[in-house]
Image (cartoon, rainbow, N blue to C red):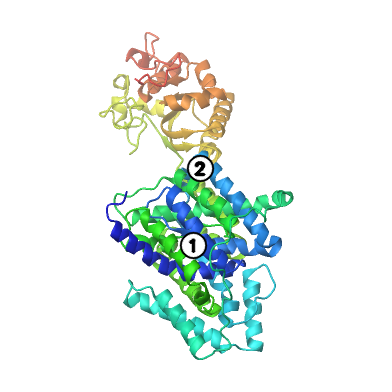
Amino acid sequence: MTRAPRRDLLAGLTVAIVALPLALGFGVASGLGAEAGLATAVVAGALAAVFGGSNLQVSGPTGAMTVVLVPIVAEYGPGGVLTVGLMAGALLIMLALLRAGRSMRYVPAPVVEGFTFGIACVIALQQIPNALGVAAPEGDKVLVVAWRAVEAFAGGPNWTALGITIGVAGLMLAGARRFPGVPFSVVAVVAATLAAQVFHLDGATPIGALPAGLPAPSLGFLDLSAAGSLLAPAVAVAALAALESLLSATVADGMTTGQKHDPDRELFGQGIANLAAPLFGGVPATAAIARTAVNVRTGAGSRLAALTHAAVLAVIVFAAAPLVSRIPLAALAGVLLATAVRMVEVGALRAMTRATRSDAVVLVLTAVATLVLDLVLAVVIGLAVAGVLALRAVAAEARLDRMDPYDGTAPDQAGQADPADPYDGLGPQSGTAADLPGSDAYGDEERSELARHVVAYRVEGPLFFAGAHRSLLELAEVSGVRVVILRMCRVTTVDATGALALKDTVHRLNGRGIVVLASGIRPGQRRVLESVGALDLLRREGCEYATASEAFGGARERLAAAGGPVSRGDGTAAGAAAGGGRAVSTVRSAGEPVR
């Protein structure tokens, strides 16, 4: 229950006043008429408020959904749109049951901003025919239709319609800056309607007759034989409804404190709303960011506000249909043009384009695809490009640093410890070659000789498909040494491709007589290395070590055993004498600490 019913009732009334011209405008723009927009706002608005996952969300017809519906109406007719809405509702409920709502968090901000900017452009272009007072030209591309409308206007200008459109849009935009609490959309529409009636303006074509009430629920539009061909449009509508609703709920959460929506319940509520709206002749619905923002700013705290918004619109449908029918189409075009302008957050766009080159590319590409192609495909393209660029950036973080472990002069030596990494094994004081096992047994000449035969590489970052081969390329070409030590304590992740690349590199080096020793393999990465045989290859010759310290000792042992420069008089390897070089002979469990 709400703790402030009076404030919620006032917020609901305010939202209804703002939503009325938008519902009418989007209904007309969709091709099903103003009555379809009102039915959607009433039925879907009420059901989404009850069953949805946000206490502050306001649902109804939206500009983004209108963009998708226009080509569906042109191809399948009004009955096809209602069927698509019904199917989309079922798909949304299925998504809710599959708990897909949480995936919204993975949509990058540049995709959202580009998508919103593209929708704003499409909405504005769709209003060109009504704004110019010409019949809507034929065509399924909004740019083509808008251009043909401009050509028709040039052949016979309708200055009355253009003046009404500019006046309504100008009053909304200018008034909102000075007095943001006043619903200038209603003020402008009322003023335009009165002017058209008082001065008998011939160029101000009205909406036309509206039914005094909602139609009885019916499934007469349903044609099961056409369901197969309508599946793709239904998927597009469901995807858009999910995207816009979850985005709107996220925005609402950010505008308040103590409110958090349930994404899966929100999808369920939108599914119920879209199952019911077509029964009353309504178009597919989704949450409306603009109306939700008004709801929050006017003090709403519970679902009562959204329910009040639907109830007030229902009263208008039943009691004021004759008055609403006299509103000029050009006035609604002005409302939607102003809405499109207000959808564009210039500051957010500027910030995104300045952030990184990748963000700018994703934003622009998503916006252009929204304008030229369709909304769902635009989002898919934006996500795909963002994913590729993100993978590229992550792959670029993979590094292979070569270090000479025994010269004692390199600023970043192989013996340098990582105190924060439990898989390093050197200890915080092991910063120089002198601290390595057995190093006190050798003079400068022996150290120099060791440096010529042993080289250490530290592998950092992800070892995965996007950059494994590139990061290991230098390692595969190493020459002039007898032992290569791979310090893998800083590898963040390994996939099958990375494991195969590592195995191939070890094979190549072994084939040229170079021994490869590995240390610091994390428990979580062992499974993938085992699955492709990379770990078995290292274990076969006792070449896997728990820590870098032991791997360095193992390198000395191998050189000494082969009669190398560190052979002592008693035939014992210096590293062994110092206690180093204990190879890992068994697989550690994921929970067992690494020494």
* Residue at the image position 67 percent from the left and 57 percent from the top: 80
Which residue has dot 2 on it?
96
438 to 462, vertically: above or below = above
Instruction: Please state which of the two labelled residues, at mark 2 or mark 1, is closer to the viewer.
Output: 2
Using the image as rendered, state which of residue 234 and residue 505 is in the foreground.
234
Q: Position of residue 338 (x, y in %)?
A: 46, 74
Identify residue type, mark 1: Thr
Q: Earlier in the sequence, mark 2 or mark 1?
A: 2
**Residue 513 in sight from this viewpoint:** no
* Residue at the image position 47 percent from the left and 63 percent from the top: 314
Q: CA distance from mark 2 to mark 1?
A: 24 Å
Q: Looking at this view, name the residue that lies furthest to the left.
A: 429
73 to the left or right of 379: right
201 to 462, vertically: above or below = below
Using the image as rendered, state which of residue 144 and residue 28 is in the foreground.
28
Query: Local crowd at mark 1 within 10 Å, few (<14), some, or many (≥20)?
Result: many
Q: Looking at this view, name the residue that lies furthest to the bottom.
A: 199
On residue 236, the disc is: none
**Residue 570 in sight from this viewpoint:** yes
Using the image as rendered, state which of residue 578 and residue 262 is in the foreground.
262
Identify residue type, mark 2: Ala
SS class of the residue under badge 1?
Answer: helix
Q: Quadrant of residue 354?
A: bottom left
Q: How many labels were placed on the picture? A: 2
Q: Position of residue 157 (x, y in %)?
A: 61, 89
Which residue has dot 1 on it?
116
Q: Position of residue 284 (x, y in %)?
A: 56, 57
Q: Position of residue 265 (x, y in %)?
A: 45, 44
SS class of the residue under badge 2?
Answer: helix
Using the image as rendered, state which of residue 521 and residue 408 is in the foreground.
521
Query: Local crowd at mark 2 within 10 Å, few (<14), some, or many (≥20)?
Result: many
